Image (cartoon, helix red, strand yellow):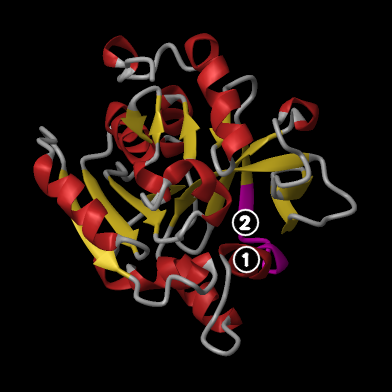
Amino acid sequence: MTTVKECLILAAGNGSRLASVSYGVPKPLVPLRGVPLLEHVMMSCQEAGISRFVIVVGYRADLIRSWIAERSFEGISVTLIENCEYGRANGVSALAARQELRNRFLLLMSDHIFEPKTAKALLRQPIGDDEVMLAVDRNVDGVFDLDDATKVECEGRHIVGIGKNLDRYNALDTGMFLCTPALFDRLESVKKNEDCSLSDGMRQLGREQKLRAFDIGDAHWHDVDSPEALVHAESIFDRDFCENPLAERLVRV
């Protein structure tokens, strides 16, 4: 089994829903318990065995570039890719990193926090060379904001539907994917007017029965994309994310 050491993080959006509390700072740098969201994601990934990050930036890319330059990330390398068309859907950001990723990789969002053990378990899963695996949460009643969550319809271990407005669903998209480079081919195939979302690409994989589900069980994750979601994440962090590698040095803000 191939050991996965690379991670693609999508961090290009302007985070408009967090604007009232971010004060112009790009969403990846919005602090959670005094630590930027992006650092939470990166350190949890490193704990899971990731050593190389490819991060796609866009809105206020200069601030993220400066933040990376000022950090001392021992044992990892970071490549920044700038997506000047960050106003488009997130599939365009993923495609911007195509030339950097030739092997299997972990794909994450910069505003989704998670437990390192979840990433470790996902990275151990076998997948075919033309498949993608999405970590799903079947506890649909436990999510903070169900209306905003991306819903998933699973049939066994195959995903046959994905989107925010699904009428039928039995799981939620956690924003954590184990990918092969085949993802980029599917994203290219569904582009319309030079635009596409990750969900567009995933639906294409689903139609081909190449999109599989990994059930995270009782593991915790949280999408921090609104002021209310940030407040909620602050309130549950000690309970649900106490094993994260940053926990010992977090400060209250």
Which residue is painted at 48% across and 30% down in the image? Answer: 114
Q: Is residue 14 left or right of residue 235?
A: left
Residues shaded magenta:
206-212
Residue 125 visible in the picture: no
- What is the x, y in percent for residue 157? 69, 44
Residue 51 visible in the picture: yes
Between marks 1 and 2, how big is the CA–CA gap? Answer: 5 Å
Q: Nearer the viewer, residue 205 or 20?
A: 20
Counting residues from the start of the chain, the first of labels 1 and 2 encountered is 1
Q: Quadrant of the N terminus?
A: top left
- What is the x, y in percent for residue 242? 43, 11
Q: How many marks?
A: 2
The correct choice, above or below, for 59 with respect to 43 in the image is below
Q: Quadrant of residue 135?
A: top right
Which residue is painted at 89% across and 50% down in the image? Answer: 168
Q: Name the residue tied to disc 1.
A: 205
Q: Is residue 109 left or right of residue 80?
A: right
User: Circle 1 — which element?
Assistant: helix
Which residue is painted at 9% across and 35% down in the image? Answer: 72
Q: Quadrant of residue 250?
A: top left
Q: Name the residue tied to disc 2.
A: 211
The correct choice, above or below, for 97 with respect to 170 in the image is below
Which residue is painted at 56% across and 44% down in the image? Answer: 225
Q: Are marks 1 and 2 in contact (CB under 8 Å)?
A: yes
Q: Nearer the viewer, residue 194 or 2?
A: 194
